[in-house]
Image: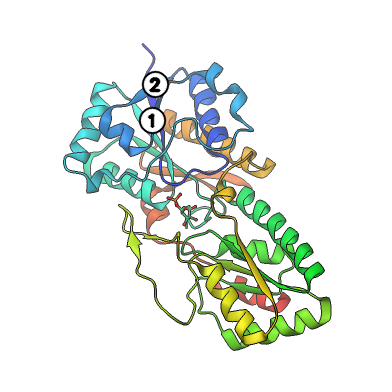
Amino acid sequence: MPKRIAILTGGGDCPGLNPAIRGVVLKAHKLGYECVGIQEGWKGMINASAKPIGPDDVRALVGKGGTVLGTSRTNPYKKDGGVPAVLETFKKLNLHALVAMGGEDTLGVANKLYKEHKVNVVGVPKTMDNDLDATDYTFGFDTAATLAMEAAERLADTGRSHRRIMVLEVMGRHAGWVALYTAIGAGADYLCLPERPVDVEDMCAKLKTAHAARNVALVVASEAVDIPGEKKEEQLDEFGHMILKDRGVAERLTKLIETRTGIETRSAVIGHMQRGGPPTLFDRILGTRVGVKAADLIHEGKFGHMTALKGDAVVAVSLEAATAKLKTVTPGWLKFSDDLL
Ligand code: F6P
């Protein structure tokens, strides 16, 4: 009987998950393992919800967005009997190892299960936010930022025709990577990210100058940015993170800018569109590489590790290091963008 590997995808989906699942399954098969797909993240490990997944199921997945396994933001540590149920599922499904694909939340659970219960787990980093510390990039980010960049350019086109200021709100949670890359890639005039408070005077002055010169000014703002003015009541998810939808960042910035500059201003929020659609080439390759490496790590018995991109190499880093702190935009990157914008 071949040893069995389970795969789960947890947290927000992102393009690159399907190529990563494909990478694990194809390499695991080559190494003589069979695979099962856990349905909807840790929820599926609590409920023992799994389906066999083999090479024929995954071959055509490299260009597909989303995750064929489904996902959830379930945290077994926040559910009564959640952790014992996960351990029970491990035995019941006769699992040799589990590949957990996720961001800091999903991998934080994987790390605790490894440390506290010696579960044979290997992590694969994914998040459009690109905020995992121990890897240079996470798949999902390139696709999200590329889509956001194209949206920003479209906004600028219509804004120029109408002589308006345009504001684009992007996702990224508490890290401003998506906003930063979008702003640089689209040649924006102002960038608002969660790593520093919005300087309203500076923003309005720069927007007026840009608008006078080019008939349009473009702002890229992250969903988690702090805007002076009224505070909204924040809701938390099972991992204790603020639920950022409905904060109305784009709308609030638009009103503020229009009032202060006297220039007609419009905004757009692209939200979950950043998480759907086919992965870019970069995300297809990165997803595939980290997936294949996860199967290798299992074969080597290197549990409690995550696959990570370091320079041009895909290596193993400890789950502990990967989940210790969030990777936010560095002062060096802020200076780089300030020199351009
Ligand atoms: O963490 C990925 C992410 O897309 C964040 O950028 C965003 O704040 C959040 O997920 C949205 O979550 P949900 O899909 O649960 O609304």
**In front here: 17 or 224?**
224
Q: At 36% from the left edge and 42% from the top edge, which residue is drawn?
A: 304
User: Alpha-carbon neighbours of circle 1 within 10 Å: few (<14), some, or many (≥20)?
Assistant: many
Q: Which residue is mark 1?
A: 39
**In front here: 255 or 339?**
255
Q: CA distance from mark 1 to mark 2?
A: 8 Å
Instruction: Residue type at mark 1: give it.
Output: Gln
Q: Which residue is mark 2?
A: 51
Asked whether disc 1 touches disc 2, contact meaning CB atoms under 8 Å apart, the reply is yes
Q: Residue 122: image x %, image y %?
A: 40, 38
Q: At 58% from the left edge and 37% from the top edge, which residue is drawn?
A: 65
Q: Residue 13: image x %, image y %?
A: 49, 43
User: Alpha-carbon neighbours of circle 2 within 10 Å: few (<14), some, or many (≥20)?
Assistant: few
Residue located farthest toward the top when viewing the structure as drawn = 1
Image quadrant in which the N terminus is located:
top left
Q: Where is 140 relative to 221, above or below?
A: above
Q: Quadrant of residue 177?
A: bottom right
Q: At 54% from the left edge and 80% from the top edge, which residue is drawn?
A: 198
Residue 288 visible? The answer is yes
Q: Where is 135 relative to 83, above or below?
A: below
Instruction: Residue type at mark 2: give it.
Output: Lys
Q: Where is 18 relative to 147, above or below?
A: above
